Image: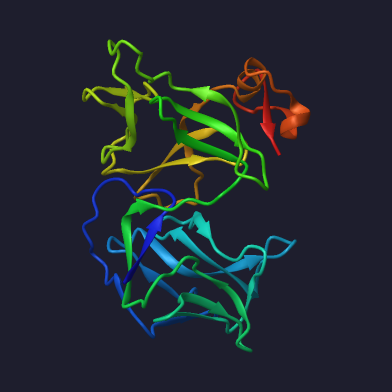
Amino acid sequence: MEIAFSMIHRVIGNSCCNYCAQTDITVGSSLTAVNGNSSWLSPSGDFAFGFRSLYNGNNAKDERLFLLSIWYNKIPSKTVVWFANGDRPAPENSKLALTSNLGLVLTNSQGEELWKLENILGDVSHAIFNDTEEIFSRGKFQLGMLGSGDLVLNTINLPSSYANDAYSITKTAGDSNGSASSGKELVFSNSGSLFVSKENGGEVNLSQEKVPLAADFYLRVTLDFDGVLTQYYHPRNSSTDGSWSILWTQPENICSAVVSQGGNGREWGISIYETSTKAQKHMRAR
């Protein structure tokens, strides 16, 4: 079998590779946690997978502890989009290896296992690191398509998998007499648009905002820590360490969304803060 590395945030646009990127990783290949950010590159070179030095309380790199992660490789901020061992940072000289029986395994210099891929069935022949798919991590919030065709956002009653009532709904369900086509799937297109594709071929966009050209900008959609679905964009050829800009959010006001669904701040662990860009108060989950 093969293992495919995938992106939490799909890279949209040109994937022409001008870099020597390791895409087909053979059994026995390994990375070592040392200063210099040992990593493998995706085909386009847009993403890197490997070790990043952690920062200490003084916002300085601690080159003795590392995070196994995936990050945007071509922008100065090196934005991390996924990490494996946040609760068990890897000491210097830890090793990530691709094995035939366990897949990817992270061990410290004494051989103690720190992390490994789950649900590996059969023998692994090689791994592929690509640009075009997604991986998902479990958290308090989830985005999902219901059997009715509605796309919804809701909280999860952790540690169970019970889904609470939705706080945001696209209303793309069909009706009983068949006069309205139901939603079929959520699509993140190559142009960077996010929409619900309907059974009759129609599309329902999650936002009417104009999406920047994918040839010039990185585009990503995340379900953030506060339960807000957000699309960001960042110039591909940025030479400054700028931040990602927000294109749109859903819901636009998480406070109103919670109240309209009968929720309250105590249930969500919500606090109120004043934004620097809008003259209004919002609720954000901690």
Residue 175 drawn above or below residue 17: above
Picture quarter with the C terminus: top right
Q: Residue at x 32, y 22 (%)?
A: 182
* Viewer-side residue, 78 vs 231: 231
Query: In the displayed structure, does residue 1 sit left or right of residue 243?
Result: left
Residue 35 drawn above or below residue 239: below
Which residue extends farthest front?
176
Q: Residue at x 69, y 22 (%)?
A: 263
Residue 92 drawn above or below residue 217: below
Q: How many numbered discs, if any?
A: 0
Q: Quadrant of residue 3?
A: bottom left
Residue 107 visible = yes
User: How far across and down, in percent of the image, does residue 272 sit?
Assistant: 74, 27
Q: Residue at x 23, y 64 (%)?
A: 18
User: How far across and down, in percent of the image, does residue 37 sit?
Assistant: 49, 73
* Viewer-side residue, 34 vs 102: 102
Residue 125 drawn above or below residue 209: below
Picture quarter with the N terminus: bottom left
* Viewer-side residue, 217 vs 268: 268
User: How far across and down, in percent of the image, does residue 151 sit?
Assistant: 43, 28
Query: In the displayed structure, does residue 21 sit left or right of residue 255?
Result: left
Which color mode does the image show? rainbow
Q: Quadrant of residue 85?
A: bottom right
Query: In the displayed structure, does residue 184 sit left or right of residue 233?
Result: left
